[in-house]
Amino acid sequence: MTLVAIALAVLAAVALAYGALYQHEAVAGQNNSHNGLSWAHFKELLSNRKWLIGLIVTGLGTVGNIVALALAPVMVVQPVGAFSLIVSVLLGVRHRGLKVNRRLVQAVVWCTVGVTIFVALSATTARTEVHLGSDALPLVWITAVVVAAGLSIMVFFRSAPQLVLIMAAGLLFACVATNTHLVSVQLLRAGLDQVTWLNVVGLIVATALGSWFVQNAYAAGPRRWSSPA
């Protein structure tokens, strides 16, 4: 099952990279998107074909990742997501005119080698444990702290730099991944009556808030990449 989970995680990483490409281009193409993603901008996106395609592809990738997290430990599945960075670089070269130089190639190679080694080692040592009842609550509190920090950024720093938005989204989706794995294992191994619903709530809230940060990171990013010389 671990090999199946890794394969699904790789496919999910590719899907997420393509979804990010489509959605970034749609958001960055809006007028005044760099001032932040307003409700008016969001309503406009709902009729944008490219953004909707990106949403569907991202959804498929998310489903694949959820199934992978249900089949294998987080420390095996989640690092595979780094492959989406590699795919994003390749897409950047093809679609955005990203310059290919020695440093870029080295970064892609080292990222690929590092992720491959880590996942291979994790697959042979990691074990999935079922955390029920109070054993699952520490993750709830961690998620609550991260969500509270995210809400603070959203409310008090309306024009946060892109790096801050990306970091916040990363932390939130880390909570999404761990909660997804925990709830999936509870459901599959202990049954619906043993699911910790506070973790489900944390999962949903972190997903919604993380998605908001991702879309705003797209809006805060550059409208276009410079063409290769």
Image: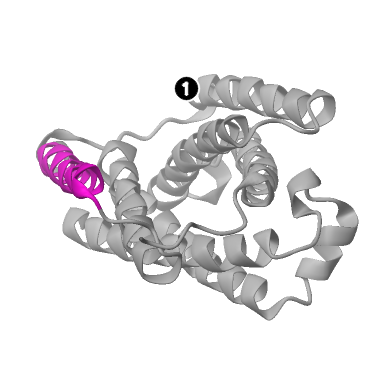
Q: Position of residue 78 (x, y in %)?
A: 34, 43
**Residue range of the region highlighted in magenta in the rendering:** 101-121
Q: Position of residue 141 (x, y in %)?
A: 60, 20
Left or right: 139, with 150 as reference point: left
The residue depicted at 10 percent of the width and 37 percent of the height is 121
For numbered disc 1, what is the local secondary structure?
helix
Q: Is residue 221 placed above or below 46 in the rendered structure?
A: above
Q: Who is closer to the viewer here, 49 or 180?
A: 49
The residue depicted at 55 percent of the width and 42 percent of the height is 195
Query: Mark 1 = which residue?
Result: 135
Q: Which residue is the extreme one toward the front?
A: 229
Q: Position of residue 43 (x, y in %)?
A: 85, 65
Identified by mark 1, the residue type is Asp
User: Mark 1: few, some, or many residues within 10 Å (few <14, many ≥20)?
Assistant: few
Q: Who is closer to the viewer here, 133 or 212?
A: 212
Residue 2 part of the magenta segment: no
Left or right: 16, with 119 as reference point: right
Res. 213 image quadrant: top right
Q: Quadrant of the N terminus?
A: bottom left
Q: Position of residue 197 (x, y in %)?
A: 63, 39
Residue 114 part of the magenta segment: yes
Res. 53 image quadrant: bottom right
Q: Main secondary structure of the magenta part?
A: helix
Q: Who is closer to the viewer here, 174 or 184?
A: 174
